[in-house]
Each structure stands twice: as C-alpha cells, then as structure tokens.
Image (cartoon, rainbow, N blue to C red):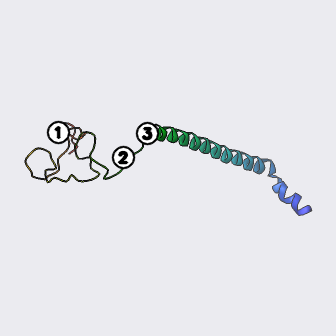
Amino acid sequence: MDSLITYLNMDGYAGFVWPSYGIAAMVMVGLFVYVWVGLRRDERTLNQLQAAGGGRRRRGTGASDQGEWDGATPPSTPDRDHDGTGTGTLSTPPHSPLTETGRDT
C-alpha cells in the first residue's frame, strides 16, 4: 500500500502531474463530443437532402442537364466538341472556368 501512495505522490510532483492528466482527459472528451455532435448534425442534413430528392447523379445514367459532355462518360458520337466538325477532340467547354481569359498557362 505504501508503494501505491508513493506512486500517486509522484515524488512530490503530483500537484503538476495529475491536473495535467485531468486537463488532457477533459480536452479529449471535449473533442470527442464536438466531433460526435458534428457527425450527428451532418447525418441529419444528409438525410434531409436525400429525402428532398437531392441525391447524387450516377455515372452512365444519362446526359447532363445541358446536353453537353459532363466528363463522367464519353459521348456516343465522335464529335465530342459538339461543333459539327466531327474531329473528336476535347476542348474546354464554354462554361468552364478555364476559358481563354482564365486559362492558367
């Protein structure tokens, strides 16, 4: 029993060691609760979005909304530019942020 008291006393440093362990434990519990609450909030948001019909578009389930190549599946025609030339080269779509004025060279 005397060796346990000596261990818990930490050679006179118990006043520094045990509070630091307590603070570290409280920080870890706080971080766990913070992450857990955020996870529950994000799961609720995801469930609400899925219930509202906001699911992700799957690959190969059809063309994009504007009828252009969306990058997920190649179009079935050799004219990938949709410019009528039939070259089949891929160009930057007009709605891309990398147009001529914004292209990073």
| Residue neighbourhood size for the residue with mark 2, other residues' Cα within 10 Å, grouped as few (<14), some (14–19), many (≥20) | few
Q: Nearer the viewer, mark 3 or mark 1?
A: 3
First along the sequence among labels 2 and 1: 2
Q: Secondary structure at mark 2?
A: loop
Q: Residue at x 71, y 48 (%)?
A: 25
For residue 57, the mark is 2
Q: Residue at x 83, y 59 (%)?
A: 7
Q: Is residue 35 above or below residue 1?
A: above
For the residues labelled 2 and 1, say whether their Cβ atoms are less than 8 Å apart.
no
Q: How many marks?
A: 3
Residue 100 location, quadrant: top left
Residue found farthest to the right: 1
**Is residue 56 toward the left or the right of residue 33 in the image?**
left
| Residue neighbourhood size for the residue with mark 1, other residues' Cα within 10 Å, grouped as few (<14), some (14–19), many (≥20) | few
Query: Percent from the top left, x then y, of residue 98?
Result: 23, 41
Residue found farthest to the left: 85
Q: Amino acid at mark 3?
A: Gly
Q: Amino acid at mark 2?
A: Arg
Tell me the quadrant of the picture where the N terminus can be found: bottom right
Could you give the CA–CA distance between mark 3 and mark 1, rounded to whole angstroms?
36 Å
Query: Percent from the top left, x then y, of residue 76?
Result: 19, 54
For residue 61, the mark is none
Q: Residue at x 51, y 38 (%)?
A: 48
For residue 53, the mark is 3
Q: Is residue 8 above or below residue 91?
A: below
For residue 100, the mark is 1
Q: Is residue 83 above or below residue 10?
A: above
Q: Amino acid at mark 1?
A: Glu
